[in-house]
Structures are given as structure tokens and as C-alpha cells.
Image (cartoon, rainbow, N blue to C red):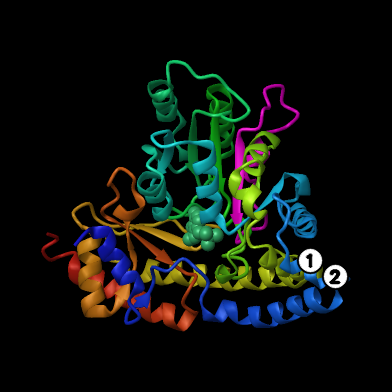
Amino acid sequence: MDPIAEVKMYEDSGDLLPLMVGGPGPDTLQNCKEIFTKATASVLETETDPTQAFRYADEQGDQEYRDQLAKFLSNEYKDIVTSSELMVTAGATQGLHFLASLLFHKHKVAFVEDPTYYAAHTMLRYDLEMKVVPVPTDADGIDTNVLDKLLSEHRPKSFTVTPEQPFWAMIYVIPVFNNPAGQCYSKERCCDLVRHARQHDILVVAEDIYNLVYYGENIPKRLLAYDNKSHPDYMGNVVSNCTFSKILAPGLRLGWLEAPERVLCVLKKSNVSWSAGSLNHYASKLAAAALKLGLQQKHVQTVRQIYKNRMTFMCETLRKGLPPGATFTQPQGGFFVWVKLPEAVDALHLLRMAAKKYKISFLPGFCTSPSGGYKNYVRLSISFCNQATLSKGLDAFCSALRDFIPGDTE
Ligand SMILES: Cc1ncc(COP(=O)(O)O)c(C=O)c1O
């Protein structure tokens, strides 16, 4: 069986305790019933014209949604976010697909950090048929020295910036609480990345999926804030691609892009926007109401604390239970612990054994690697299971690893 299909099979299996799933589980979704009941009542009963919610919307999305979101984000980010720079999406996956399909064509280059979000590099490569070029990362983020060489190597001989095609390639990154590695880019790396993007006419798509799920005192600065408008070289080279999936409900299928004018222009003029207006207009009305009523703000604080406790619990349990040779760094936010196993361990083989004998699933590192590396890594998620289930799953994971390491790793 194709190894990716095999991993999906384990992901979909209802019989396995899911340390793999990177979405909220039943306990953090429980509040949503109350939130959506109140938000629905607000949209349908208190709006002056509730039929607005059932119409096609403007290309960029509902004004109330963008206003409420801009206020919420400005407060959370401690930075100015303006509603005119926000655009509705049906979540980050659709946001990335929209950007990549409209601004780039088949065989255009997508530089992708290695490791990265497994579904993103496969979507760019297989669904959109882009030329995916892996770029190594270290503890500070994407390696901009290697990136520099790759940019020179892949730049087309002639490229002229036009309003329809302002960029010849994209760089896909997750600079804050990376999926899978959990780390944040250093300030220097963010500055360097933006400088390269400006110099080389590249669009950086930063997926800011986990930024609001931070466990320290302060929220890390998003990459877009480094693309400073007052800088003399500013042109608008960074997009922030975000979602309600982790801070509210993935079933809502709602997100937003925060993007410079020249990018929004292309998206708004697309035939998709022309045909249907913004996506998920009704869902955006519900989110706007949840924001207006202060329900989303309260919910994000609640889930942040739950996830923080779980992250501490997972890391403490792993510190006690992992066999020698298995290492990780505790992330300061997000959902994932990225465990490095001894070089000889193939995490897919470990998964096969652990699924069969211990009834657990986790993500083997090779799925996250556009170069096919990271075979001896495992991504564990804190997001789906409550603490009691997590405890069982982690005990099982550590036992599986102790069984596996001294044995045959083939
Ligand atoms: C980096 C990254 N991008 C996108 C997604 C999916 O987001 P959405 O549910 O908004 O499509 C995830 C969820 O796991 C993610 O980690």
C-alpha cells in the first residue's frame, strides 16, 4: 500500500486512540453548542434584515465579519489589523488553494519548509502540480542561506512583475508554533525571509494557524508584521492565512486571509469570486455574531488554558516515559510535540506495530517531509484527546517505543 494512504487509514480508524489528529476534540468543542445557539439567534432574530445572511456576499466577504475580526485580531495580536486587508476563506486549506491556484500556475515553484504541514506540500505538488522545492529548517526556522541559493537557481531568466502576476514563486511557511516541529521563527529569520521575498519577487504564504494558542506571556509576532508598510522597500510580499478551525470549530469551515492590496486585487477579480462572492457567508455571519457577543474571545481564553495544561502534561509524561535516545523540545504554543527517535527507527514501522499491539495512532515524520526525510520522527498531538485519554495514549506510546527500539527496526 502507498505509505501515505496507509497513514490515512490509521488516521481514519475509529479503533485507535488518536495521538495523530490535529483538530479540537469533543471536550473543547462542547462549548460550541452554546456559542452557535446564541450566535444563530443573534443573526436571525436581532439583525434588522436577517435575509442578508442567506444572500451571496461581496467578493471580499461580509463587512461586519471583517470589522469584528479586525477588532478581535488587533486586540489579540497587539497590532493594527484593518478590515480592508481581510478576506473571507473557507478555512486555511481553501485559503492556500485559492492563493496558489490564482497567483501561480502549474509547474510554478513553491519553496516549502522541510518539515511542514503534510497536507499542504502534497496539495501543492499533487493537486496543483506545482514544482515543490524543499528548504531545510533549523531551530530558528527556514534556512535562509540555503533558500538564497535555491532562489537564484530557480528564478526564471526573465520575469516581469505585472498586476496579474506579481510573483514568480511562493514560499510556504508556518513561522509560529510550526506544524509539526512546534518552534517559532527567530526575529532575525523573519526579517531575512521578508528581505528575500522583496528582493526576489516572491509571495510568502505564512500559515498563522496556531498563533492564538500560545502558552507564554506574550503572543509571538506574525510574519506579516515584519513586512512593514513604512519600510522604503515595501510592496506587500506576505500573506497571513488563518482559520477558526483551531480556536472555534473546524466544522464551520471558515477562515481569513490578511493580505496586501496587490494580492487581494487578484483574488477579488477571480472568476470564483465573480461567480459566487465570498465563500461561507452564513458561517461568517455566525462568527461575526460570536465576536460581537464576546463569545469567541471568552472561548479562546478557555481553550488556550486547556491546551496549555495538556501540553505541560504531555511533555512531563514524555520526559518520564521516553526511552533513552528519544528527544523533544517543549513548544510554547500550538498542538504538536515533535519527537526525534534514534536514527535507525522508522516511525512508519513503529506506527504499524503500535496500531496493532497498543491501539494508538500518531503521525510518522516522513508524511511531513517534502524531501522524504524525517523518517525517525513522530508528531504527537495534544488537541483531540482529553487528559485522561492522553495519559493512556502516551503510556501506550512509550511502551511501544520501548518494545520497538531494541528489536528489529526493518
Ligand atoms: C498548518 C495548517 N494549515 C492548515 C490546516 C487546516 O486548516 P483548515 O481547517 O482551516 O483548513 C491545519 C490543520 O491541521 C494546519 O496545521
Residue 375's place in the image compared with 318, above or below, is above
* Residue 8 position in % (x across, y down): 32, 66
The residue sitting at the front extreme is 275
Residue 140 visible somewhere in the drawing? no
- The amino acid type of the residue labelled 1 equals Gln
Q: Secondary structure at mark 1?
A: helix
Crowding at mark 2 (Cα within 10 Å: few <14, some 14-19, many 20+):
few
Residue at left offset 58%, top offset 51%: 208
Left or right: residue 183 versus residue 71 is left
Left or right: residue 225 versus residue 100 is right
* Residue 121 position in % (x across, y down): 40, 47
Left or right: residue 293 versus residue 272 is right
Q: Which residue is mark 2?
A: 49
Q: Which residue is mark 1?
A: 52
What's the magenta region? Answer: 213-242
Residue 188 visible somewhere in the drawing? yes
Residue 145's place in the image compared with 142, above or below, is above
